[in-house]
């Protein structure tokens, strides 16, 4: 059913992208910048991430075909990758890794930072929003779309998730104050359990299709 597909797509992408969890990372990499610059960084990061996810959403199956990879095989491998991400979330390793990356960039000398990277591209757009997990998720979900209506729904859901990242970035400082470390930790673990279940379902579906034919 269309509703089931869209709910599954939303849950998978919301958990893999984790818009709420990106708030402290956004604050870390934009420390010391003005409100105008922060807004500009937010716009560019979500625009780049949206373009990347759309490319893989539409061209993911073609890429798999060119590489000689079957959709069921990618479902199994993608499901395993998502399970690894879920494992990191449950044991608070993913948030720690993201925070370390953001802190490292935030404390980089400003002059060299401007020359070496643009935080809108890295780490915000890639890999925090459009990372391996979210790219794998959109390819998997696109391969499961049975018709144009479901594919259109997936496009809308993907853009809505990316758009929510923009809203989170604009309200990052208020969100961090309201939630606190404990709430963020509990939420991350709960979402990790949900992603683990979804990833196991991906692996089961892929294995069934791979062996049954």
Image: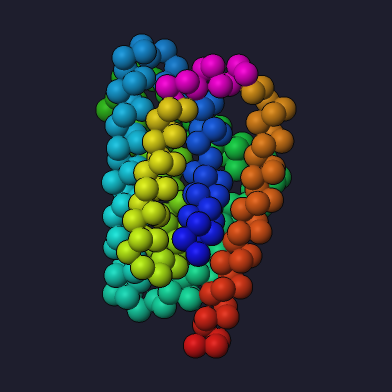
Q: Is residue 186 left or right of residue 76?
A: right
Residue located farthest toward the bottom when viewing the structure as drawn: 212
Main structural element of the magenta stretch: helix, strand or loop?
helix
Compared with 117, 16 (above or below) is below
| Relative image position of residue 196 (x, y in whole percent) | 65, 56
Q: Is residue 123 positioned above or below 106 on the image?
A: below
- The residue positioned 46% from the left and 51% from the top of the image is 134
Q: Residue at x 50, y 36 (%)?
A: 19
Instruction: Identify whether 6 is placed above or below 74.
Output: above
Residue 17 x %, y %: 49, 44
Instruction: Report which quarter residue 152 is drawn in.
Output: bottom left
Q: Splitting the image into 4 quarters, where does residue 59 fall? A: bottom left
Query: Position of 11 compared to 147: left or right?
Result: right
Dividing the picture into quarters, in which one does residue 8 lie?
bottom right
Q: Which residues are magenta?
A: 169-178
Return the residue nearer the eye: 189 or 67.
189
For image coordinates 60% across by 37% down, the residue present is 95
Q: Position of residue 9 (x, y in %)?
A: 49, 54
From this viewpoint, is residue 146 visible?
Answer: yes
């Amino acid at each position: 059913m269309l509703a089931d597909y869209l709910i599954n797509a939303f849950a998978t992408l919301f958990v893999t992208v984790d818009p709420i969890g990106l708030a402290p990372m956004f604050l870390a990499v934009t420390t010391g910048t003005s409100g105008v610059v922060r807004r500009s960084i937010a716009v560019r990061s979500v625009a780049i991430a949206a373009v990347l996810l759309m490319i893989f959403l539409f061209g993911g199956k073609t890429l798999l075909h060119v590489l000689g990879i079957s959709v069921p095989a990618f479902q199994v491998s993608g499901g395993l990758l998502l399970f690894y991400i879920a494992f990191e979330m449950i044991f608070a390793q993913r948030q720690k890794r993201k925070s370390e990356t953001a802190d490292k960039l935030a404390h980089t000398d400003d002059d060299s930072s401007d020359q070496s990277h643009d935080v809108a591209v890295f780490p915000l757009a890639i890999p925090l929003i459009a990372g391996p997990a979210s790219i794998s998720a959109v390819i998997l979900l696109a391969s499961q779309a049975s018709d144009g209506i479901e594919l259109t729904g997936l496009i809308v859901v993907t853009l809505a998730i990316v758009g929510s990242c923009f809203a989170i970035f604009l309200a990052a400082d208020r969100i961090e104050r309201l939630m606190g470390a404990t709430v963020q930790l509990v939420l991350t673990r709960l979402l990790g359990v949900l992603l683990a279940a979804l990833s196991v379902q991906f692996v089961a579906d892929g294995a069934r299709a791979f062996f049954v034919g």
